[in-house]
Amino acid sequence: MSTPLFNARIAVRWSDLDAFNHVNNATYLTYLEEARLQWLDALEGEWISEGAAPVLAASQLNYRRPIEWPATLQVELAVERLGSSSLTLSHRILDESGGQLHCDGHVVTVWIDPRSGRPVPLPDAVRSGCEPAAG
């Protein structure tokens, strides 16, 4: 994974557990969604509008180690590919210290016009937010 673009902290909830007392595999997607929304919310400028909204087009998750409760996780996001209307973010879900990898992979998000369903260019705020910070 390249240099992380964003690092989100997420607390594991009791309700995230399944019958085997570890986080249900579908919940990992919720953690990734929360991390992406935290990143988007931190951007300067508009990332969603009447004419441009993100939709998840693909997801790939490699489950490396179960997550148990209680835990606080860190979710690292990095830019894997920046297209004209799509963004591929690689991700890693780690324990709070960053020493234990629970999941890695990537997701593809496409910005579309909600009225037509057709792809639209990435918002400037998203494109700018994918550039490495100076300094």
Image: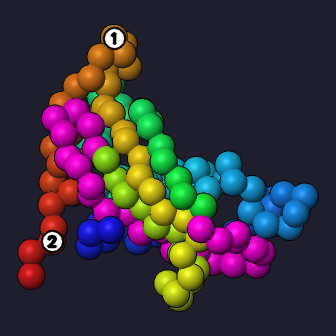
SS assignment at label 2: loop
Q: In this picture, is 25 found above or below 74?
A: above
Q: Position of residue 14 (x, y in %)?
A: 81, 66
In primary-sequence order, the first of circles 1 and 2 is 1
The residue located at (48%, 43%) in the rendering is: 59
Secondary structure beneath dot 1 equals loop
For this view, does 120 lie left or right of residue 90? left
Q: Residue at x 81, y 61 (%)?
A: 17
Cα distance in 3D space between marks 1 and 2 = 34 Å
Give me the residue at 56% from left, 82% from top: 100
Which label belongs to residue 133?
2
Q: Position of residue 92 (x, y in %)?
A: 46, 67
Specify few, some or many for label 1: CA neighbours under 10 Å numbering under 14, 14-19, or 20 or more: few
Extreme-top residue of the structure: 116
From the top left corner, tell me how far across and down residue 134 is, in percent: 9, 75
Whole-percent x and y of residue 37? 44, 52
Residue 112 as seen in the image, left or right of residue 17: left
The mark total stands at 2
Q: Which residue is mark 1?
A: 116
- Label 2 neighbour load within 10 Å: few <14, some 14-19, many 20+: few
The answer to whether residue 71 is visible is: yes
Q: Is residue 29 above or below residue 52?
A: below
Question: Is residue 44 visible to us here?
Answer: no
**Quadrant of the rendering where the C terminus is positioned:** bottom left
The amino acid pointed to by label 2 is Ala
Q: Nearer the viewer, residue 66 or 72?
A: 66
Does residue 42 appear to the left or right of 129 in the view shown? right
Q: Which residues are magenta?
A: 64-87
Amino acid type assigned to the residue bearing label 1 in the image: Ser
The quarter of the displayed image where residue 69 is located: bottom right
Question: Is 67 contained in the magenta span?
Answer: yes
